[in-house]
């Protein structure tokens, strides 16, 4: 399972490239970079604080809940690889999860490197050491966590079926995973109301919102309705 921001759209969270993707008229792509943080840490911090507040107010939707049922049914034959940083998969109950792009709920000190899980919305971006804290997400131009990439790539090479839901499949290396899986023999299925860069390279496309399609797939598999 590979998910992107679209899986959280029905929880009311803006996607990166959707019509509501802009924040204060700014393109997230230009804010989610180390350069933007160095140049204007306050604005970047406000961007992430706004996303933390939105994520905290959002609830997992039936698509998230369907993935929990799927994990419960498949156990160690299931892995959820997500690009999302909003924490909704974890709040829905998924545990067999690989976060490729970090989390809004982690912070890292740019001076001493101290990392912390942080659910407090009013966190000051200063570390005890006086260094500035940054969001614990992977910015454009930054390497993804090696362990996460290794785990996700190994899973792609072993998978029988890969469902790709809610991603425009534009951001690499995450977007390269379905291709790795397909080459290794997996059956690949895209779940997205729109066509994407991946649409011509999957075995099947199910055009529709993940909040409807995923529960329907579970129902069809007799794995109980996720409502
Ligand atoms: C790397 C965390 C190398 C932050 C994110 C120039 C310089 C440097 C790098 C590059 C470069 N050019 C290209 C690159 C590579 C770059 C890249 O791929 N760029 C793209 C834009 C071309 N990648 C990187 O920079 C990566 N790092 O390459 O490092 C390196 C190696 C070694 C050492 C040093 C460096 C880092 C990429 C990670 C960036 N961080 N997020 C944050 O969140 O603020 S990526 C960001 O985009 C989010 O994580 C998001 O998840 C991700 C992908 O977007 P999507 O999830 O797909 O969301 P999107 O809005 O695009 O699409 C939503 C989809 O949902 C749509 O298709 C829509 O139709 C669909 N949808 C809507 N509603 C629903 C739905 N689907 C289902 N149901 C619905 N209801
Ligand atoms: Zn510090």
Image (cartoon, rainbow, N blue to C red):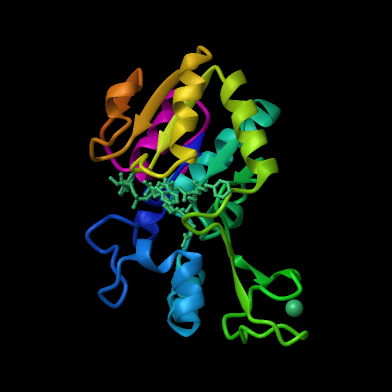
The magenta stretch is 208-226
Q: Position of residue 168 (x, y in %)?
A: 33, 43
Q: Position of residue 133 (x, y in %)?
A: 64, 77
Q: Is residue 100 above or below residue 53?
A: above
- Residue 161 visible somewhere in the drawing: yes
Q: Position of residue 108 (x, y in %)?
A: 67, 70
Q: Is residue 203 above or below residue 148?
A: above
Front in this rendered view, residue 202 or 28: 28
Position of residue 107 in the picture relative to residue 34 (left or right): right
Q: How many marks?
A: 0
Q: Tell me the residue at 49%/37% (across/down).
A: 2
The magenta stretch spans residue 219: yes
Residue at the extreme top: 185
Front in this rendered view, residue 210 or 23: 23
The magenta stretch spans residue 215: yes
Q: Tell me the residue at 25%/40% (across/down).
A: 193
Q: Is residue 65 above or below residue 29?
A: above
Q: Is residue 137 above or below residue 89?
A: below
Q: Position of residue 93 (x, y in %)?
A: 62, 50
């Amino acid at each position: 399972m590979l998910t992107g921001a679209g899986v959280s759209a029905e929880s009311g969270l803006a996607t990166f490239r959707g019509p509501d993707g802009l924040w204060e008229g700014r393109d997230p792509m230009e804010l989610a970079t180390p350069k933007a943080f160095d140049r204007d840490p306050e604005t970047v911090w406000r961007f992430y604080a706004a996303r933390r507040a939105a994520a905290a107010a959002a609830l997992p939707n039936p698509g998230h809940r369907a993935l929990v049922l799927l994990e419960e049914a498949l156990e160690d034959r299931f892995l959820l690889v997500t690009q999302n940083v909003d924490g909704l998969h974890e709040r829905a109950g998924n545990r067999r999860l690989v976060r490729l792009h970090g989390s809004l709920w982690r912070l890292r000190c740019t001076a001493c490197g101290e990392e912390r899980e942080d659910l407090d919305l009013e966190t000051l971006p200063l570390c005890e050491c006086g260094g500035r804290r940054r969001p614990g997400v992977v910015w454009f131009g930054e390497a993804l966590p090696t362990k996460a990439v290794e785990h996700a790539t190994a899973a792609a090479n072993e998978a029988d079926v890969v469902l790709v839901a809610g991603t425009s499949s534009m951001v690499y290396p995450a977007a390269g995973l379905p291709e790795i899986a397909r080459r290794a023999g997996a059956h690949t299925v895209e779940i997205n109301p729109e066509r994407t860069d991946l649409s011509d390279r999957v075995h099947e496309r199910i055009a529709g919102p993940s909040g409807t399609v995923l529960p329907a797939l579970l129902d069809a598999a007799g794995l109980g309705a996720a409502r």
